[in-house]
Image: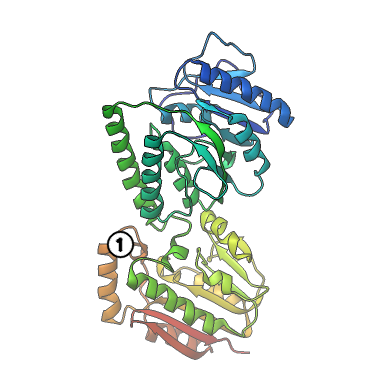
Amino acid sequence: MMLASEAPRVSDAPPSLKMPPLSIVVPVPGPGPASRACLAALETARTALGLDAEIIAAGVADASSPSPRVTWVRPSGPGFGRALRAGLDAAHGEYIATVDAECAGASAVLEALWTNRDTAEVVVASRYVSGADARMGLLRHVLSRALNKTFSRGLSLPVEDLSSAFRLYRADVLRTYRIRATDYDVLPELLVRALAGGWRVREIPLHVELSRRRRSVMPLVRLAAAYARTFAGLWQLRNSINAADYDARAHDSIIPLQRYWQRQRHRHVTDLIAGQGPVLDVGCGSSRIIAALPSGSVAVDVLANKLRYARRFSRRLVRASGFALPFADASFPCVLCSQVIEHVPIESPILSELRRVLAPGGRLVLGTPDYANWEWVWMEKAYGFFKPGGYADEHIAHYTREGLVRQFEGLGYTHEATRYILRGELILAFRKPA
């Protein structure tokens, strides 16, 4: 597990040679009757589930209740985030569950999470979905609701409860993250990074009584500052092309121009591929165009997180580079490549690969900005200014309509259609000679 903790893992027990099915991580703020009762209940729940699960308590070991079945790890410093990261670093299970040590009924929540393990890569026991019954103090409820509304709306997240500590992760979701948060802001950070990776997140109702935590003013101020820093960093991630759902979310963007652009692209492309038979979509990203591909189509992308997100569109997905498509010659009656060729060198083999897999008499639909038009040149500058981290920074090959038409007609192709979006984005359709 690689979570970029600040110190090496310290454990009282050597790692198991055999990967257990489940690791249960419990950040323990300090010795006390609540945490002792929680750990005892989790040991009982482990037996009831019939699992060879490991329990990892992250905190200062409680000498008053030693148990050979609980592994204690020491965090690198104070804070819930450091304790959680230490526990995650020490986990060896195929799945990792996290629970709140100061909560009665944690064992029942664990059973519900484990039952739903096959429904998503991250399962969250949520206080704010239908059917939930989570009892907590009024101040905690108000602060929690305000926090979750700010994060979910500000980051366009399809999750209601980002601060619930009751979760089940498939372990490989966490392996490549570099988690920076050191307090409770680690909880939204983990979820947002999972969503950016294209993993599925599902919420189930939480039924539990939460402890009434008492916090002084200064710790609350420090926690608010930590949440603000984390929100700023996650906002950049959510609005960059590195987010798995970047293309899909743009379809419903709050920015009118971006929303219009995406919907026009969807309309033109789906119109040009209609009736052409199965489509090979090269560089599909997470665009909603994937859902409109006809039966028998294949969507290809080199980025694993985009393809993970695209699973919801129920189309065949292949991870591959457009430089070497893993398909035989003349495999598809229609090949689509939208907003890809401008991101790779102009001398790359991508255009020859698109022609190779296209069947004789088939249609090629090609989308790219038209750098011959001043409208696009100025829009790209504006886009780069207002949307730093967007695709505009990655355009390294500049094409024009005249150049592409001349190139393909020189190969015997017939130019059948030209579409524009605000005289900037160019979408061409060519027919391969039969």
Q: Where is residue 375 in the image (x, y as percent from the top left)?
A: 27, 80
Q: Where is residue 93 in the image (x, y as percent from the top left)?
A: 63, 32
SS state under label 1: loop
Residue found at x 38% / y 31%: 182
Q: In this view, does 206 lie above or below 8?
A: below
Q: Toward the viewer: 156 or 336?
A: 156
Q: Is residue 206 above or below residue 27?
A: below
Q: Is residue 372 above or below residue 48?
A: below
Q: Toward the viewer: 94 or 418?
A: 94
Residue found at x 63% / y 76%: 294
Q: Toward the viewer: 225 or 423?
A: 225
Q: Which picture quadrant has residue 390? A: bottom left
Most distant residue in the right direction: 50
Residue 92 visible to an observer of this rendering: no
Residue found at x 58% / y 30%: 106
**Mark 1 is on which residue type?**
Lys
Disc 1 target residue: 387
Q: Position of residue 401 (x, y in %)?
A: 39, 84
Q: Where is residue 110 in the image (x, y as percent from the top left)?
A: 62, 34
Residue 9 visible to an observer of this rendering: yes
- Circle 1 Cα neighbour tier, 10 Å, few/some/many (<14 / 14–19 / ≥20): some
